Image (cartoon, rainbow, N blue to C red):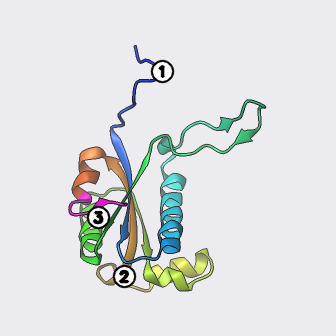
């Protein structure tokens, strides 16, 4: 029997890896965009809707924490390759997306660059804890 205050340990992990040379506003923007991709494609990561004591409804959110990491461009590139080789669900944000204004242009900017030449500034992954840990090798928790 699980007690209400017993910490929950999830079998999976949601992680965002940001390039360590981003401005503060870029880190926040990239993180928000990246996790939206996971939430839209992986319904199992979304919990139940919220409501306050007055019954005001709120949208559901992730059912587990999102861990945010940072690393160099090289660490991000390696993590991207490991996520691909493990076929983990992932979303990417490239430096080109800072110059676009909407989803259609974002998708076109990513589509225009071969996978091994993407200028990655962010990556989000979801999967078994140990697989995500291996993808993030060399990265550190975001301060």
**Counting other residues with Cα less than 10 Å from the Cα at mark 2, is it few (<14), some (14-19), or many (20 or more)?**
some
| Residue annotated with mark 2 | 119
Gap in Å between the C-alphas at discs 2 and 3? 16 Å
Task: Kindly state the secondary structure of the residue where label 3 is placed.
Answer: helix
Give residue 2's position: percent from left, percent from top. Answer: 41, 18
Q: Position of residue 81 (x, y in %)?
A: 25, 68
Horizontal and vertical percent position of residue 13: 36, 47
Residue at point 36%, 81% (across, down):
118
Going by the image, does 108 lie left or right of 17?
right
Q: Are marks 2 and 1 in contact (CB under 8 Å)?
A: no
Q: Nearer the viewer, residue 42 or 96?
A: 96
- Helix, strand or loop at label 2? It is loop
Q: Is residue 100 above or below residue 47?
A: below
User: Residue 9: horizontal and vertical position, in percent?
Assistant: 35, 34
As drawn, 124 above or below 21: above
Considering the image in quadrants, where does the N terminus appear? top left
The residue positioned 25% from the left and 59% from the top of the image is 135
Q: Quick check: marks 1 and 3 in contact, CB under 8 Å?
A: no
Residue at the disc numbered 1: 4
Q: Please state which of residues 89 and 76 is positioned toward the viewer in this rendering.
A: 76
| Quarter containing the C terminus | bottom left
Q: Which residue is mark 3?
A: 84
Q: Which residues are magenta?
A: 135-143
Q: Residue at x 47, y 44 (%)?
A: 45
Residue lying at the far front in this picture: please name it.
143
Q: Main secondary structure of the magenta part?
A: loop
Q: Quadrant of residue 85?
A: bottom left
Callout 1: helix, strand or loop? loop
Q: Is residue 142 magenta?
A: yes
Q: Nearer the viewer, mark 1 or mark 3?
A: 1
Q: Residue furthest top?
A: 1
């Amino acid at each position: 029997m699980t007690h209400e205050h017993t910490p929950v340990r999830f079998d999976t992990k949601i992680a965002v890896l940001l390039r360590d040379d981003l401005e503060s506003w870029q880190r926040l923007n990239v993180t928000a965009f990246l996790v939206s991709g996971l939430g839209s494609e992986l319904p199992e990561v979304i919990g139940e809707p919220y409501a306050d004591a007055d019954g005001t409804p709120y949208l559901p959110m992730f059912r587990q924490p999102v861990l945010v990491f940072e690393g160099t461009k090289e660490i991000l590139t390696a993590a991207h390759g490991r996520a691909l080789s493990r076929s983990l669900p992932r979303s990417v944000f490239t430096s080109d997306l800072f110059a676009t204004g909407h989803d259609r242009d974002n998708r076109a900017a990513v589509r225009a660059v071969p996978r091994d030449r993407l200028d990655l500034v962010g990556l989000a992954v979801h999967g078994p804890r140990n697989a995500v840990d291996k993808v993030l090798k060399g990265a550190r928790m975001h301060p």
